[in-house]
Amino acid sequence: MNLYRTVSNKLIKKIKCAFFVIILIIGGVYIYTTFFLLKQFYSQTTQQLNANVATHLVEEKFKNDSPFLENGAINKSLFNDLMHDMMAVNRAIEVYLLNEEGGIVYSVVLEHNENDKNIKSVDLKPIKEFIKNNQSYVLGDDPRDETNKKIFSAAYFEKDGQAGYIYIILASQKYQQICEQLLTKFFFDLSIGSTLITMLFAIVVGWISIWFLTGNLRTIIYYVNKFKEGDLSSRIPNAASSDLSTLALTYNSMAETIANNIQHITEVNQFRKEFIADVAHDLRTPLTAIKGYIETLKIKENITIKDRFLFMSIIENSASHLGNMINELFEYTKFEAKKVTVKKSFFSITDLVFELQKRYELISTTKKITLSVVIKNNIVDVYADKLLIERAIQNIIENAIKFTPNHGEISIELLGKNEEYVVLKIIDTGEGICKIEQEYILKSYTQLNTTDKNKGIGLGLSIVKKILELHQTELRITNNKDKGTCFEFTLPYKCTNNKLL
């Protein structure tokens, strides 16, 4: 599979669209913010540049003339001159004469609109703040539009016993409308240009970004597909340093688990095939003997009583051997199916060992084998399933008796260790088991290559291994070829689940 074509087109399209939308949104926010700040900048600059306009007006126009006549009326002649000056200099400003309460006494506005909703007074708070510090950016009421705030210039005056404020709006409604029209057109032109540039930029940068951003993802998909196609050794290299390290490490762990499970299943299937073949072979031996001697008894009529008794004994022994093998097979399948319940309790391992010594004393004496028990250190009660441990020790003793020649020795040793556990050893002087056979007999049902085919180990040691696994311990085999074998395992003095001490 091509490493560069592992990411689907659907995902690439989604990433492209997302990237384009993000750039478009960022571009829109940027344009809006730019115009907003530009408008703020222009307003603040205009106000600061014209901050002293009202002060200069008061100083120049009210120096020799008063805004009020002697009868208290408005000096319209003065304000008409002011209108001519405005037409010549700046048609965007609006001049208002305010009393000390903020009421509008008179106004000079070049452009009038029928829709104007003129207000009678303005708020003096921003005006006083501006006069106090004319460098600050302050917005005041627009007498022609109470919904908007405008930049202004203001000054306080006192003349002929009358006082008030000159209030100048620096951006009239006409000026505002023209600015908005120009800004709208400029914004529209800029938006179209920005959109085209953004699309082109998004396509170019998007391709490059997607290539780099999905590099690790493509690698992961590539190795996942290799694993799917049957390459169980497929692992993501340098998973810990990947941008998607969690995903890569998780896949490697999962692939390792799956590969191990597949290997285990393969081994189990192979084991079952060998198991069935071995069981069939071992069952066939006593059955063949039984069948052969029964046919002999049926055919021959002149068999002596002694021979008849011998044949019947052989048939009985073969049947007994067959029954034992079937019982072992049934017992082993229970362990394999995990249908054995462990019932742990405290019991005396010393008493159990001496009891088993007496039980097998007759069999060992028949073969002139010395069966002894050795106790080292102080042994206290152990915590385990007594019946299962008894079964395990029985199997090891029977195996030792089977492979120990006449006049041999079998020793059962108990050794206390650190007041935590006891070590149990069963040592014989039999043939010994080589290292390869040791590993093999603990994995599956097997029968060693011995000269005596009736000495098959069968399921005995496999059952021992299963029992010890249920007790969280293991069977260890040590020996020298032709010098005997030592079977060893440990049992705890304490409860392994920490409920009992």
Image (cartoon, grey):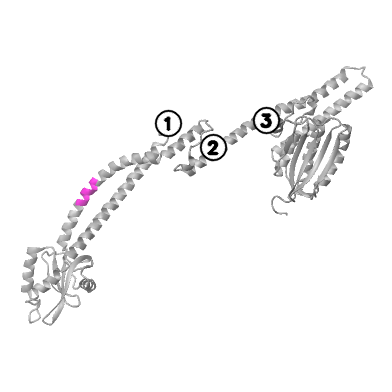
How many residues crowd around disc 1 within 10 Å: few (fewer than 14), some, or many (20 or more)?
few
**Residue lying at 23% horizontally and 60% vertically, measured from the top left:** 40
How many residues crowd around disc 3 within 10 Å: few (fewer than 14), some, or many (20 or more)?
some
**374 versus 287 height, above or below:** below
Q: Report helix, strand or loop for mark 2.
A: helix
- Amino acid type at mark 1: Asn
Q: Report helix, strand or loop for mark 1.
A: loop
Magenta residues (range): 186-193
| Res. 148 image quadrant | bottom left
Q: Is residue 36 magenta?
A: no
Q: Main secondary structure of the magenta part?
A: helix
Which label belongs to residue 255? 2
The residue at which mark 1 appears reads as 2
Q: CA distance from mark 1 to mark 2?
A: 21 Å
For the C terminus, which image quadrant?
Answer: bottom right
What percent of the width, then of the height, locates residue 413? Answer: 80, 42
What percent of the width, then of the height, locates residue 423? Answer: 76, 44
